Image: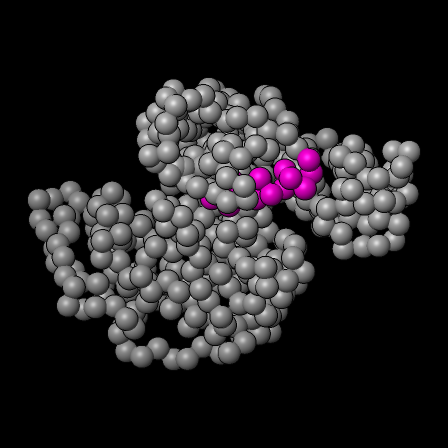
Amino acid sequence: MDNGEILVSLDIGTSKIKVIIGEILGDSLNVIGVGTAKSLGMKKGAIVDIDETVHSIRAAVEQAERMVDIQIDQVLVGINGNHVQLQACHGVVAVSSDNKEIAEEDIHRVMDAAQVMSIPPEREIVDVIPKQFIVDGLDEIRDPRGMIGVRLEMEGTIITCSKTMLHNILKCVEKAGLSIMDICLQPLATGEVALSQDEKNLGVALLDIGGGSTTVSVFEDDGLVGTRVVPLGGYNISKDLSIGLRTTSEEAEDIKLEHGHAFINDANEEEAFEVNIIGSNQRQSYNQLDLAEIMEARLEEILIYSAREIQKMGYDEIPGGLVLTGGSMSMPGAADLAQDIFQSNVRIAIPDYIGVREPQFTAGIGILKFAYKNAKIQGKEFSNAVTSQQNNVSHVEKEKPIRSKKTHSPKQKTKEKKEPKLANFFKYFFD
């Protein structure tokens, strides 16, 4: 891929559609444009109204296009959900060249060989993620191109998903006037930005807490070993506030963003505000402690359900701790509450790029970085994702999406000191 290539990522979330335009310069990424729009056709991470989803995608794309005066033609799309499955794969081929030097063609052949397995008719292969290449018995090779050998093997992971879910997403993208550059698994992409190499090697749990759902992923030995989705997120916190404060959902969302706090012990009782009572002209005063009593209870529930999913994957302990990201992690006190519950290392991951330094953009940036990295390993060729409408686009910071290898068709609490949780969280809940 040439330096200066423009890539665009599309993150279709339950609460927001996010489009990020970026420029690849060497191996570095510059974000040059961002577009966001309220997601109207999604619920709990699934599409429930195609037309509304298409309208939201168009709105986010147009906002991003206006930032740099270019037209977006192709996007890199992330997929997520409990319908996604991971399966180990292994391919073996003989090196084809006369001088036995491993070339691009051999990489493609061994990748194709790894996909020769029985897949149920209702599922579709989305991608193959190489874990290591083996040349004549020598393993742990990242890139075998240029090496001399007779036998080339590849061990990796095949990602499959429901055809119905995938085609609904792709139909929305295509109806919005876009073509698919590439499709990648969102937890893998998010981990590319949110996690360090040491964390992925040691073993870490990644919780992406969005508006309508929470994605729970476990990484170990530098690979994704499992991912699950909990149908709870920031929307449930806002709904609880709407009921507890007796106000509209829109005002509850605004109050959560302006005054919310997720940890009762640190909430400020002096921070007061007024709320319009639904169905009347009255206003009632509340303080941040009142919000924390509601918000902490729901976030604690989300974290406990996430812990149960980690337990189901076979992990009683996570040496690398937990990393939290996603739009709902913008609220103060979230990390403190998680630390208090899990009694483990906890941090919030935020992308370090100008204009997108918020947890809600972690997945979008990750899609760009992961797809570009994976494309180089697999030898994919991508064309430009945008059509320039002016020569100079350097005045804004943006990144371009990677194109897909295929185009698919159609309990009340007080401010008193809480009792300490047990150190071993999982034994507390599951023994």
Side (left or right) of 359 relative to 403: left
Residue name at image x 45 percent, y 77 percent: 421
- 177 and 385: which one is in front? 385
Chosen colour scheme: one colour
Side (left or right) of 127 relative to 296: right
Residue name at image x 49 percent, y 61 percent: 323
Q: In the displayed structure, would residue 279 be above or below residue 293? A: above
Report the predominant secondary structure element of the magenta stretch: helix
Q: Is residue 14 magenta?
A: no
Side (left or right) of 397 relative to 307: left
Side (left or right) of 196 relative to 226: left
Task: Please indicate, yes or no, whether residue 395 appears anywhere in the rendered image.
Answer: yes
Q: Quadrant of residue 126?
A: top right
Task: Please indicate, yes or no, whether residue 44 appears anywhere in the rendered image.
Answer: no
Q: Which residues are magenta?
A: 365-379
Residue name at image x 21 percent, y 46 percent: 251
Q: Quadrant of residue 222?
A: bottom right
- 252 and 227: which one is in front? 227
Give the x, y percent position of residue 342: 48, 70
Q: In the displayed structure, would residue 394 be above or below residue 377? A: above
